[in-house]
Image (cartoon, rainbow, N blue to C red):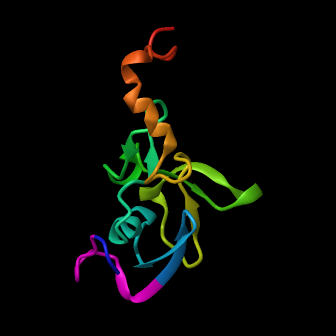
């Protein structure tokens, strides 16, 4: 496994039980006891979404319910559940998750062109209503 996985440690992570899951169409591996966030970081996935206005990269910055950036979609099709903090999702075999933002992908998002146009874009209606 590449990424940021420590060779040992991590209370509650059972390295004898590998789990396979999918994230944005890629098959990745984690362990029993991982959260989706910890498994993504262990696999080198640091950008899990993009900001709403300027599409700036968003990654895991908190733990548990305090996470405000690493929001993911769980499932597919009619069973899709949006905006779930990745830090609250226990990893399980066959889990399917995806980024709610970023097209065609979170690593290469065409919406990030808005960042270059920031000086021309006024503050949005949500700042002063």
Highlighted range, magenta = 4-18
Q: Is residue 91 above or below residue 128?
A: below
Q: Residue at x 40, y 61 (%)?
A: 37
Task: Give the tally of numbered discs.
Answer: 0
Q: Is residue 116 above or below residue 57?
A: above
Q: Is residue 9 magenta?
A: yes
Q: Residue extending furthest top?
A: 129
Quadrant (top left/top right/bottom left/bottom right) for the N terminus: bottom left
Q: Residue at x 46, y 48 (%)?
A: 49
Location of residue 6 by image quarter: bottom left
Q: Is residue 36 above or below residue 92?
A: above
Residue placed most toward the observer, 80 or 119: 119
Q: Residue at x 27, y 70 (%)?
A: 4
Location of residue 68 by image quarter: top left
Q: Residue at x 65, y 62 (%)?
A: 75
Residue 101 coordinates in the image, percent (x, y)? 53, 45
Residue 108 coordinates in the image, percent (x, y)? 45, 51
Q: Residue extending furthest right?
A: 78
Q: Is residue 108 above or below residue 115?
A: below
* 6 sits left or right of 87 in the view: left
């Amino acid at each position: 496994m590449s990424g940021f996985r420590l060779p040992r440690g991590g209370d509650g992570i059972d390295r004898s039980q590998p789990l396979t899951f999918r994230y944005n169409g890629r098959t990745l591996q984690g362990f029993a006891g991982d959260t989706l966030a910890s498994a993504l970081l262990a696999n080198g996935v640091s950008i899990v979404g993009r900001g709403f206005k300027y599409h700036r990269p968003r990654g895991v910055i908190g733990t548990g319910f305090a996470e405000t950036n690493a929001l993911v979609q769980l499932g597919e099709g009619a069973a899709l559940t949006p905006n779930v903090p990745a830090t609250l999702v226990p990893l399980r075999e066959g889990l399917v998750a995806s980024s709610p933002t970023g097209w065609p992908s979170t690593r290469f998002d065409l919406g990030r062109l808005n960042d270059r146009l920031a000086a021309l874009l006024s503050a949005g209606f949500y700042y002063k209503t």
